[in-house]
Image (cartoon, helix red, strand yellow):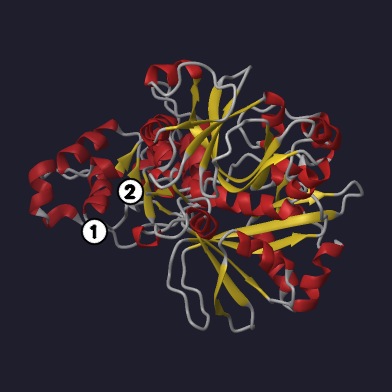
Amino acid sequence: MRVLLDTNIFIYREDDRILTENLQELLRLLNKIKVETLIHPLSFEELRKDQDKERREVILSKVKAYPILEQPPDPIKDKSFLDVIGKDIEIDDNILYAVFKDAVDFLITEDRGIHKKASRLGIDDRVFLIDEALHIFETYTHKEKVISPPALKEDFVYNLNLSDPIFDPLKRDYEEFEGWFKNISRKGRKCWAHYREDGSIGALLIYKFEDEAIEATPPLPKKNRLKISTFIVTHVGHKIGELFIKLSIDISIKNELSEIYLTHFTEPDDRLVELISEYGFFKVSKNKRGEDIFIKKLMATETEKDLHPLDFAKKFYPSFYDGWRVKKLLVPIQPEYHNRLFTDFGGRQTKVTEHDGVFIVEGNTIKKAYLTHSKILKMNPGNLVMFYRSKDQSRITSIGLVESVNVRVQNPEKIITFVGKRTVYSRGEIEEYAEKPTTVILFLHHFHLKNPLHLDELKEMGVLTSAPQSIIEISHDNYLKIKSRGGIDERFTIH
């Protein structure tokens, strides 16, 4: 992409002062998204006419840092252009003509006269003020901000210690690793890292945005993808692997990417392959180094809706089937357990220990567990569960899909066996729960509602008449109301 900068954006005028912060942010942004910024050669003529010698020299020194638009098109013989602008061609008209003739993609100028002429020429959507350009080009940047636990730190690769033991296997397996590491450090590549108390790295995720074909056997076509470049977890037992998958998916969704991939030397009983396969990564090819290539698709087509809803969710997670074949259930959950189960829910108050590197393990997981004394027994794998946060918020906040159900369990040891590390409950709480018949729901968490729905709104919609005290089933039509009003993304549902 080529953008022409009109030199007036560098000039300070008492009656039309340009905020330097805006300009600096714009230039930083254009550099980040690798836009080629150019100056029209005739702009220098205009600058040299400035009677303020000191200002003239300062501005000329700034402008010389930019490449020149070579052999710019000449409007003098273009009748269609002259019929609109007039025959008395000025420097500004030459600059605008570069856009008109597609020598550049866009022009950024604070000259209102140029904007008026651009409108007459029908190219005003390609001529921006500084603030307009900031708004437009921000949409070209990768949106990487996702909610993560404080124990996980978003960082730049250049802040990592290459001598850390976590890199030893990579240095052994890839002789080019150190060169690659230094290269991506210079490019300002980002990562997610968990640091142990001694400062060493316990887990690391490095990622990259790609829009190219993948050389492999068989080759993979050019496509916008998120590449997981490095995925290592040595600080085990905290479900950080699931958290990394969740973060990769969140980043992909924010950047409108529908595929994620990674390369890996597969070993017997490979724990990484076992983990990623649970969430829809599948082997598609092999590269020239002999690494297997695993792809994950985030969206499905109508042809795949005949899969069992649970199989569908695992293959295309976070997409899910929400048609009439599955029940929709509303599950009340107390704030305390909601905070621990859904640590990525916006506005949650974090605990002090989380900032000291301690994870709330059940918050890291995609696969979660919930205990209830509800008497509803007809719940099957693939059913949808919507969590209603009671007491303090009285809102439907989150949606998931039932993986398995164990009903009327009263043996605490069995409950502990069922839930593993997924539960928000302590052993003491489980023993107390088990005094009554307990239903154990294992589910996949898919999304938080973009617009959590308050009880008052649910009443107005005809979904509820009062706050739910136990699990209740709602109709498909009422679910569709929640889906629409709550902002569940249609791209990730199929029916």
Amino acid type at mark 2:
Phe
Amino acid type at mark 1:
Pro
Q: Nearer the viewer, residue 279 or 430?
A: 430
Element under disc 1: loop
Q: Which residue in the protein does label 2 denote?
A: 106
Element under disc 2: strand
Tell me if residue 52 comes above or below residue 469 in the rendering: below
Q: Is residue 14 left or right of residue 393?
A: left
Q: Is residue 167 left or right of residue 57?
A: right
Where is the N terminus found, in terms of image quarters?
Answer: bottom left
Q: Which residue in the protein does label 1 denote?
A: 73
Q: Is residue 93 left or right of residue 66?
A: left
- Quarter occupied by residue 431: top right
Does the rendering let one see residue 98? yes
Q: How many residues crowd mark 2 within 10 Å: few (<14), some (14–19), many (20+)?
A: many
Tell me if residue 144 comes above or below residue 36 in the rendering: above
